[in-house]
Amino acid sequence: MSNIVVLGTQWGDEGKGKVVDVLTPYVDVVVRYQGGNNAGHTVVVGREKFVLQSIPSGILHPGRRCLIGCGVVVDPASLIQEMESLVQRGIVLDGNLFISKNAHLILPYHPALDRASEAKLGNRRIGTTGKGVGPAYVDKAGRVGIRMADLLDERLFREKLEYNVTQKNRLLRDIYDAPTFSVEEILIPYLRFAGWLAPYITDTALLLARWIDAGYSVLFEGAQGTMLDVDHGTYPYITSSSTTAGGASTGTGVPPTKIDGVFGVSKAYTTRVGGGPFPTELHGEAAELIRVRGNEYGAVTGRPRRCGWFDAVVGRYAVRLNGCEALALTKLDVLDQCDVIKVCTGYRYEGELLTEFPVEERIWAAAEPVYEELSGWQTSTAGARTLGDLPAKARQYLDRLSELVGVPFGLISTGAVRDDTILCEDSPLTGWFPALRSSLR
Ligand code: GDP
Ligand code: IMO
Ligand code: MG
């Protein structure tokens, strides 16, 4: 049985939710390892659409155990709302959902600080989701964070909250000129949340260790994407967690020696929400065409996503950093009508050709993408079930992307629903998930 990481290779919203949902039948456990309710993972089942924020996308498959690991930051009000909405739609959580005792809490002053900081940054603002994720990770690294286990200990929770509210109020009032909080207005609802969540809170690292020893297979579900990683992304235009493969280990307590593979998820083009560099960004009509066909509006904030061509420099960078052995390519259908499709193979900077993603902000601002043009297939890819069902030019596009990023594709997605998926034979997927062979058509 294999334990596999599934993560985004671009700036998020690559279709991780769909890919995790498609692969969940082949694993026993799905665990989220970082991020929080800034994530919006969409899963479409028949005519029903689910947007998962803090709960793993595997939850829609009955009997799969879904864990929220210690690397995740949890907003209890948002999580409870997500849980209630799933239960109302017939999803069973009891016995299937487990929350780490070590996961840090998002408290009401975190979104307040997030918004206040963004307002102060002016044109250098990040364009965050405003969910308080960054400030919650600041407190975690600063050793003043409050964890799930603390929430279950009323005396300790009150003590930590009192300290934090005093500090945060100073920041909010004196630095940001923003409204402050009283301890009681947070304490009372949070103690209610504690009662609600208590049955789900446990030592998830220990559970995972026992399950892995017993032969269960685990899928690690990444949120956001490689280019938003706190270390390896386009800093400071990033989210505040380790979105890359290493985060799967630190964010769950499963040692790297127990992780068997990494499966990256890419869109057939690129999108980004919020500020920061985006070398292949398109503007005007060209961007609008992709945005409309791909319905590129944020699942969490509803913001229009910035759209551009596939960037193979980013693709190679993500493959190298994460050790991806294969990729899933989603939303191929969105390019169905294009007559010409461009792929970025490098950047031109001060007369030099760069083929590795640069670290310097000054280079991002001035780097010009170098494109290769491929001719579009201009036929529908909807309903394709095997690679052979795809138009020849679509296969050529896939072959060229795979050659440029240096790894094969294991899954191609041509629509939001489960059925619009091609599982590729002769890819690492069949080794990771032997039962998947019987699903190959
Ligand atoms: P995630 O955050 O990586 O899970 O991605 P999002 O859910 O934020 O965004 C992906 C969007 O594309 C969702 O609305 C999905 O339902 C949709 N989607 C996923 N795969 C495909 C596909 O192959 N084709 C089309 N047209 N839509 C897809
Ligand atoms: P999923 O998991 C796309 C972006 C925000 C902003 C930056 C920092 O659905 O792919 P934050 O609120 O995290 O401090 O914002 O990161 N961002 C995402 N972009 N998909 C996401 O999640 C994102 N989560 C955060 O737009 O630019
Ligand atoms: Mg998303």
Image (cartoon, helix red, strand yellow):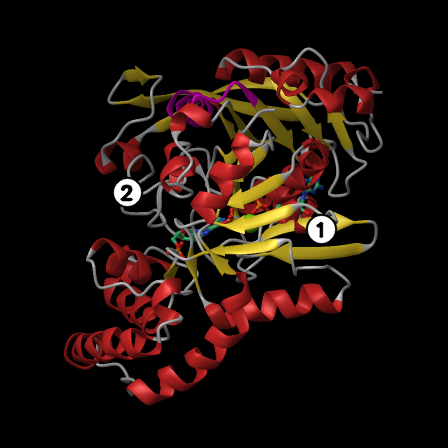
Left or right: 262 with respect to 116? right
Q: Mark 2 points at which residue?
A: 235
Instruction: Measuring from the top left, give residue 402's x and y in whole percent.
Output: 57, 15
Residue 317 is a magenta residue: yes
> Dot 1, how many residues are within 10 Å of its Cα: few (below 14), some (14-19), or many (20+)?
many
Helix, strand or loop at label 1? It is helix
- The residue sitting at 71% across, 66% down in the picture is 87
**Quarter containing the N terminus:** top right
Instruction: Compare residues 285 and 260 and report the one nearer the observer.
Output: 260
Instruction: Measuring from the top left, give residue 186's x and y in whole percent.
Output: 37, 82
Res. 5 visible in picture: no
What segment is highlighted magenta in the picture?
313-326
Decide whether the magenta segment is chiefly helix, strand or loop.
helix
Instruction: Compare residues 387 and 45 and report the one nearer the observer.
Output: 45
- The residue sitting at 79% across, 19% down in the picture is 391
Circle on res. 100:
none
Helix, strand or loop at label 2? It is loop
Instruction: Measuring from the top left, give residue 102's x and y in whole percent.
Output: 37, 55
Residue 177 is a magenta residue: no
Instruction: Measuring from the top left, give residue 214's x and y in whole percent.
Output: 58, 32
Query: Between disc 1 and disc 2, whose residue precedes?
Result: 1
**Quarter containing the C terminus:** top right
Q: How many marks?
A: 2
Left or right: 247 with respect to 93? left
Q: Mark 1 points at which residue?
A: 60
Inspect the image, locate mark 2, and give the three-letter code of the amino acid beneath it.
Answer: Tyr
